[in-house]
Structure formats: C-alpha cells, structure tokens
Amino acid sequence: MSVLKNKRGLSGLEFYRNGIVLRKNLTELLLRDFGIRHKIRKSVAYTKNMTEEDAAIFQNLVDKYECTNIIEEYPGWMIDNMRTNILNLCHSMIMNITQANTIYPTNEYEYYDRRNYQNHAIGNCEQLLQEMQYIISVIPVDANKYLPYTKMIVKEIQLLKGWRKSDNRILKSIQEKNNVNNENDNNRDNA
C-alpha cells in the first residue's frame, strides 16, 4: 500500500534531485540570456543581409521603438560574464554535492571531509543568491520572474543543511565506537 503524498517524508537524495533541477532551470534561464538578449540578437541579425535602403528603414524602426537601448546599456561581454558566473557556481555546487555523497564516513577524518564538501555546496548556493541579486539590480528585469529560481536556491540550502545535520548521528556513532575501542585497549593494557 502506498503512502499519501502529504504523509511522505523527504527522499534521502532530495538535495541532489533539487540541485540537478536547479542547475537545469538556471541553465535554461541563461540560454534565454536572462530574458533580455534575444531581442538584441534579432534586431542586429536582420540588418546583415539587407540592402542599404532597407537597413536604414529598419534602423529607423528600431530607433523609433527603442530596441537598441539594451545593446548600449548592457554589452554582450557583461551578459556573458554573468552567465559564466552562474554556470560555474551551478557546476561547483553539483560537484561538491556529488563528492560529499561519495564519502560514507567510517572515521572522523572522513566525516569532516564530507562535511567540508557539504559546506562548500551550501556556500555555492549562497553565492548563487548573491549573483542573482546582483543581476536583478543591474539588468532591468522583472524581479518576480526570478523569484522561482531564488526559492529553489533557498530550498536547496535548507535541504543541504538538513543533510549535513543528519550526519551528526554518524559522527556520534564514530565517536562512540572510538570510545569503546579505547576502553577495550585500556582493559587489555591493564590485564
């Protein structure tokens, strides 16, 4: 018998699935150049194959309807730089999650190594939030359109922190095992 959806707990790898979806959704946003650049490419591309007369008419229309403001205010290198920053942060986040998930700690060193990767993944999410905030403040986009992405990043942070917190049981188990082993060693030495 299946469990009702509202009664189900989070999957053990929900942080991973959410991270993958977050990366995919942000990549799709970047493919649309934050929702502004597709207008730039269309207006500039058409003039290449036009006669001089047609290009002048087209340019007058572009000027009349202010289609060039974005080109002047937000050059391609700026959009490319912002895109690269987001892609690199998404890549680092997933790689840190993957690396942390490959380590099942059997000693304190491995526990802290795994925790370090978890912390880096959380840091990548915080950096993504900062980069999104910067983009919203620089590019004239509707901030409400970015809200779903921000919510996904915040959810990812919560999931990663929950995963990290659940690892405290592993550390406790490792420390208890070490204490038992130390007591056994002391008993042998005293015997």
Image (cartoon, rainbow, N blue to C red):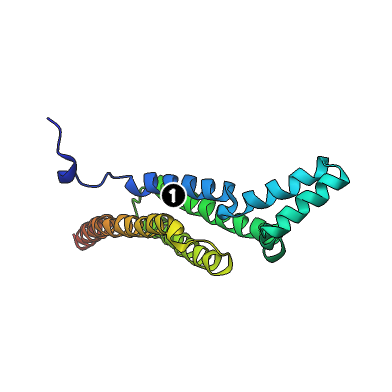
Q: Which residue is drawn at 20% across and 63% down?
A: 190
Mark 1 = which residue? 22
Q: Can residue 73 be seen in this view?
A: yes
Residue under the image location 15 percent in, 39 percent down: 4
* Left or right placement of residue 105 versus residue 56 in this view: left
Please state the horizontal and vertical placement of residue 90, each as a whole percent of the image: 51, 53
Query: Residue 109: horizontal and vertical position, in percent?
Result: 40, 58
* Spot occupied by residue 52 in the image (x, y as percentages of width and height): 87, 46
Splitting the image into 4 quarters, where does residue 186 fall?
A: bottom left
In the picture, the quarter occupied by the N terminus is top left
Q: State the image quarter where residue 182 is shown.
A: bottom left
Which one is in front, 157 or 137?
137
Badge 1 amino acid: Leu
Q: Is residue 121 visible?
A: no
Residue at the right extreme? Answer: 52
6 lies left or right of 54:
left
Tag count = 1
Q: In this view, does 31 lie to the left or right of 12?
A: right
Q: 57 or 35: nearer the eye?
A: 57
The residue lying toward the viewer, choosing from 145 and 174, is 145
Extreme residue in the top direction: 1
User: Badge 1: few (under 14), some or many (20 or more) residues near its Cα, within 10 Å?
Assistant: many
Q: Give the percent coordinates (x, y) of residue 134.
A: 54, 68
Q: Residue furthest left?
A: 1
Quarter of the image where the C terminus is located: bottom left
- Element class at badge 1: helix
Look at 64% across and 58% down and name the residue there. 79
Residue drawn at point x = 50 percent, y = 50 percent: 26
